[in-house]
Image (cartoon, rainbow, N blue to C red):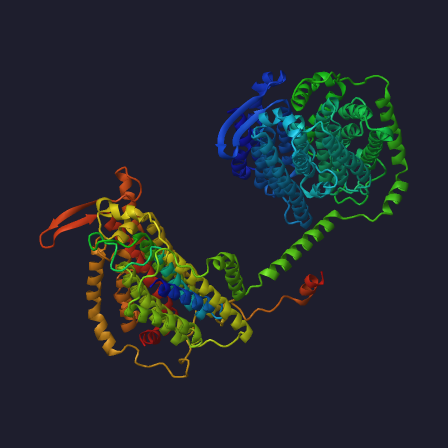
Amino acid sequence: MSLPLVVFLPFLGAIAAPLFAQGGRTAIAIASSVPALVALAALFPHWETLATGGTVLHSYEWLPAIGISFSFRLDGLALLFALLILVIGLLIILYARYYLKPAENIGKFYALLLCFKGSMLGIVLSGNLLLMLIFWELTSLTSFLLISFWNHKQDARRGARMALAVTGGGGLALLAGILIVGNIVGSFELDDVLAAGDLIKNHSMYPVALSLILLGAFTKSAQFPFHFWLPHAMQAPTPVSAYLHSATMVKAGVFLMARLYPALAGTEQWFYMVSFTGMATLLIGAYTAMFKHDLKGLLAHSTVSHLGLITLLFGMGTELAAVAAVFHVINHATFKASLFMAAGIIDHETGTRDMRRINGLWRYMPHTATLAMVAASSMAGVPLLNGFLSKEMFFAESLELNLPGLWAWLPPIVATLAGIFAVAYSARFIHDVFFNGKPKNLPIYPPHEPPRYMKIPVEILVFACVMVGMFPAISVGPLLNAAAGATLGGELPDFQLAVIHGFNLPLIMSFVAFAGGLVMYSQRKKFFAFHARFREIDEKAVFEAVVLRIVEKANSFTSQIENGSLQRYVMLLVVSVLAVAAMPLLDLGIFVGERGLSPVDWPTAIAAVVLVACALATAVVHRERFYALVLLSVVGLIVALAFARFSAPDLAMTQLSVEVVTIVLLMLALYYMPSWTPIETPLRRRLRDISLSLVAGAGMTLITLAMLTQPFSSISEFFLANSKPGGGGTNVVNVILVDFRGFDTLGEITVLAIAALGIYALLKNTPLTPPPSDGEGHAWSRDAYPLMLRLIARPMLPLALMVSAFIFLRGHNLPGGGFIAGLITSVALILQYIASGMEWTQDRVPFKYHNLIGLGLLFATVAGAGSLAFGYPFLTSTFGYLTWPVVGKFEVASALVFDLGVYLTVIGATLLALVSIGRVSPHSAIKSKRGAA
Amino acid sequence: MELVFALIIGSLTASGVYLLLRARTFPVVVGLTLLSYGVNLFLFATGRLSTGQQPIIGSSAGYADPLPQALVLTAIVIGFAMTAFLVVMSLRNLADNEDDHVDGKKPYKSPAPEHEEEVTGK
């Protein structure tokens, strides 16, 4: 339980921390420290197990089907990183307390910092690769938010975007790589993957998986050529830089290499890809760092170079090199975090980070200067400090590489050269900032020492540098042994942690680096002049330009295929359907199946001819919209007849009533719209459309013919057999709707309700002015409500309501039911609107249609949920029989309540839609007349 | 009978598709209505054609397939809701753009010239 706790506590803290923001910076800093303190306490008891090379595994199932689990695994390596994250995190919290101004959004800052900490702990403690990837992406996201913390600055936003694009892109590659590895191993559990090293390395997909995973690691750890994002991420507040960009986030890539070392390392591909990338990064970072005038820029490039060094060590593939790499992770984190903090203090106290202006600070802040100089000396690799130890190990290992011929010289030369640069930029950091004359033109003058507690984190880290440098075996030995052992996944090589290993070649390389570095710094003017001859590339501008270009390309591509023309989309849709259907249809031809054709009777034939003629005529005369509408209504009526003719009485009744409502609706719409359609499209285009639609029609004819003449089997036997005994009704269609497939129906009436409410919302406060006259210039009739219609319509209402009640009640056994009854009621009410006008009718309708819809849905849902109370599944129906005095035996089914819900929803939705349209016009009187015409 | 039914569906589809391809909203709504008649009839026809065999227990010797009928019944109602929604969208379009073109604006003009050149130049 303790490991998931360690990971998830910071996230909980992130929720809680902003609550303390009201209490000021001290309160929130204390609150934010709690998760880390608890986590340290939770990790402490596991030390015994880890020191002897054991692991702790806490695993919970999550999505076993895809191999992902909440599996947390602690070993020496994970412990080392977890300690770095937690301890440096605590120091950062303290430091940020003094760094941030009270007016800043400290709640947001600490919440993000804690989220980041949790994500980072998730990476190092995950025992499942997919779980680790989730946390990996979370660090990308949270670091994006942290870098852009000062989001009013354009540079900060751009830097953050760049970091997100690079590390997020790498994350995608990593995902692909992990999926491949998981596929090879058959599991995403870390234990299984680490044990399957030989299987992975001998697999044909190994090079692909390796490249993808390394891409993830290299982007995260700012390796060449992806290193450019890191210096631009320095727009972040300094506590963020000190935390993310020295100790944690950028170490995630390095951690990944260490984590998967047993599974992936030890091959030629690994050696060449990792070591050469590391070598290039080491050199480029160290060289560039010398020429940066920005304090944090220097440190950022130096970080790039040190990350390259660690990568190179992992790439070498020897066991001692891996030990050195793990060692340097610790050392770099301590001295670099303290240097970032010192840089932040200087920035804080002088108002600038430009080393050309900051000079001679020794006189103003000797305490800070001492701390920074010790840390910088460690960065340069001065003996008795921790940086020296791992650098010596690195020099020693660079000599051990068995490269052929003259290539063997390359690693030691690169190492020494990088050492020279490192000494030079460290010397610059010390000399330029603390000595070298007087400060020039500082925004804050005179600078002085920061608050006492702001220096404590720096002091602790510098103390660690010295302790490790002087007593490595005592201070860091056990932790290093545990971590390196876990990295190698087996026995540790024999090595000694000592301050001096005697007078040997690595020591000579160190001397050369020192002498060279100091000479180089003293001659720095020449080097600056040399460097100035090359045009500096602003990676941010290049990156922005590339992104802009991609967006532009994407836009122009989109506008090629998506130009905003609906006609074109519909055309493409039809064409692609035809294209897909073409081959099978041509194969099919005119196919008549085994059932054969049945004889045609005269009435049917005549109706069919009328239907086809009207359908085609609708298209032909569509410019005269009113005529098209009349023809459309004829088509709809014959469709209703067709349903009746072919044994579907329920459908016929539904179609008939829907037809009435639809035509009224279209009439109403037509009142606002132009009454004719202009000729806009050229003839060629119309001919194209005609041929497209003829082909579509022919295709449908062929398919229908083939289908109708095929014998078939249906699942309906079940419904026919169980309708009466199971559902209590003889009208199988209705029983299917309200009982067997009641859930579908519930969904459907919900859609109906949503559509009606959508219509209401779309038309609310929409001004639409109807044209003053009809299409041919005649003024509208003044006789808004014809007397005859009015007189007939009013007595019709109770009759129609009675009919609909009858249809509703008998629906379970005979054609009818909620849908049809609802539509009949709607038509009866619509007739009142048409005959007597909006206001007259609306005044007499005692409820709002919105409420009716809600009530209907409520009835339907409650009727369904009722069965839950009796322990049956949702929408199980029951039925019984009552004997009424006059009517006689009468069936009562719980499905009737459901059908009542359908009935109410249909009425509410239909009328809400129509009344919304009718109400748009200020002169609803005229509209009603037009509707009745 | 089957051929007649197939021709009905074919002609509804042809008219519907042609009207769908028009540039003004009203014909498109009418086209969609025609097309939904065709689709409803087609779905209904998956249960095959039968005469005098309404699926009401005890009313006849055999029964037509009730399942497509139930599906089509709801399809008709939902189809109405869709038509109504579309009609209202076109009314809203008319109110907002003072034009009933389907693109919600005046007929489409090709993008800015330099854009075109850039694309065609490659």
Is A202 above or below relative to A909? above
Q: In the shown orientation, is residue A730 left or right of residue A228?
A: left
* Foreground pick, A284 / B37: B37
Number of dots carrying numbers: 0
Q: Residue at x 89, y 44 (%)?
A: A529
Q: In the shown orientation, is residue A176 left or right of residue A907?
A: right
Q: Where does residue A178 sit, x and y in percent of width and height? A: 61, 35
Which residue, as the protein is rendered here, is positioned at the far left? Answer: A885
Residue A41: in sight, yes or no?
Answer: no
Q: Quadrant of the C terminus of chain A?
A: bottom left
* Foreground pick, A681 / A904: A681
Q: Where does residue A548 sit, x and y in percent of width and height? A: 68, 54
Q: Where does residue A43 sit, x and y in percent of width and height? A: 57, 22
Q: Quadrant of residue A371?
A: top right
Q: Quadrant of residue B39?
A: bottom left
Is B115 above or below relative to A355? below
Residue A806: in sight, yes or no?
Answer: yes
* Foreground pick, A137 / A873: A873
Is A814 above or below relative to A12? below
* Foreground pick, A557 / A83: A557
